[in-house]
Amino acid sequence: MNALEYETFDLQEKLTHKGTKEWGMIRVAQRPNGAWITLPVMLAVGAQDGPTVLADGCNHGDEYEGTEGIIKTFQDLDVSEMKGNFIGVPAVNLEAFAQMCRFNATEYVPQDLNRIYPGSPKGSITNYLSHFYCETILKHCDALITLHGGGNYEYLEPVVLYCGEGDQTAKTSKEMAEVFGFKVLWKNTGYKAGSGIMDECAYEMGIPAITPEIGGQCTRMFQREEHKAMIQAGICNVLRYFGILEGEAKKTEDVLYVDIDYLYNRNGGIHTPVKKAMDEVKAGDTLSIITDVFGQEVDRLIAPFDGVVIGYWTYAVCHPHSWIYMVGKKVAPEEA
């Protein structure tokens, strides 16, 4: 079956088509040359009633692991055995996806899609896309898996973020994170209402949400299939958690709970990582040495606290005041 093209799109109506699969492009806005800016959507509607789980990728256009994991998941689902629905949006920011950039570079002032949710119907195209996506897809779903990665410049150890505190939405989000299958769980204690971040926006809407992050361009030569399989397994385990697929969604064993901070350098230059992913560090340890084009040291990033390296900048050059390390403070399971 070829991809469909939707001039208008009603997700609730589509979910009445039990036991079906279809995919296509939803028209969002027309370009001056007549081509359309579109939103790709993949619909696996179970034969029986049940919850609807949404998985999306490429809110940042260079983070492709989620895209491929969503595609593989959708292809392998048997809707005749499903009690509920899977909605896949493999590339929310399709313009940035095509440009291999974090942002849509065709905007006069590029914006980070994952910092402006729920968007505005009166804003720029990125702002409008955010609003369109929330209204057309997100608000009609029971749970969200929004997938990210290291993109073009960073490596990320497989980690699942969840946010919220105390209420049922937070509890469900944490349980989704615990069954996804990654060994590092990130309790987002920095959650702030109105942040514009997708999972936090979903939480404010009462929709349980997790953000699995994995890999980056530096891993795709050798770990592409491995990461795709890990994402597929994680999505399917969340579908089991909600009863959409048969089987038990077991919690991942021996996980590490952390609260991650982004660490910034002062001066840019040639960036040499000293500590790598999952290295334990002590406050005062050197994480990175930065030198100029003459080989002279111009900066060094020092760990401000004890923790574990979760991600780091892998590009050979870094700009000043960039976040070049992600270090997690360990959190006791009972506090997570």
Image: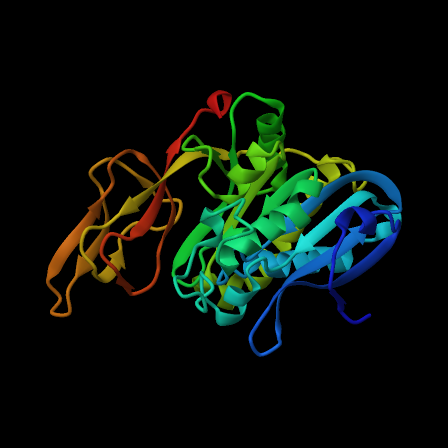
In front here: 99 or 80? 99
**Corner quadrant of residue 251:** top right
**Corner quadrant of residue 261:** top left
In front here: 204 or 284? 204
Query: Percent position (x, y) of residue 215?
Result: 48, 56
Q: Residue at x 44, y 51 (%)?
A: 156
Query: Percent position (x, y) of residue 233?
Result: 66, 49
Query: Percent position (x, y) of residue 132?
Result: 61, 52
Query: Percent position (x, y) of residue 299?
Result: 15, 53
Determine whether 213 is above or below 28 in the image.
above
Determine whether 304 is above or below 218 in the image.
above
Indicate the quadrant containing the N terminus: top left, top right, bottom left or bottom right: bottom right
In the image, is 267 to the left or to the right of 94?
left
Residue extending farthest to the bottom is: 33
The colour mode here is: rainbow
Q: Residue at x 62, y 41 (%)?
A: 180
Q: Residue at x 45, y 34 (%)?
A: 188
Residue 39 in sight in this render? yes
In the image, is 31 to the left or to the right of 106?
right
**Corner quadrant of residue 318:** bottom left
In the image, is 252 to the left or to the right of 260?
right
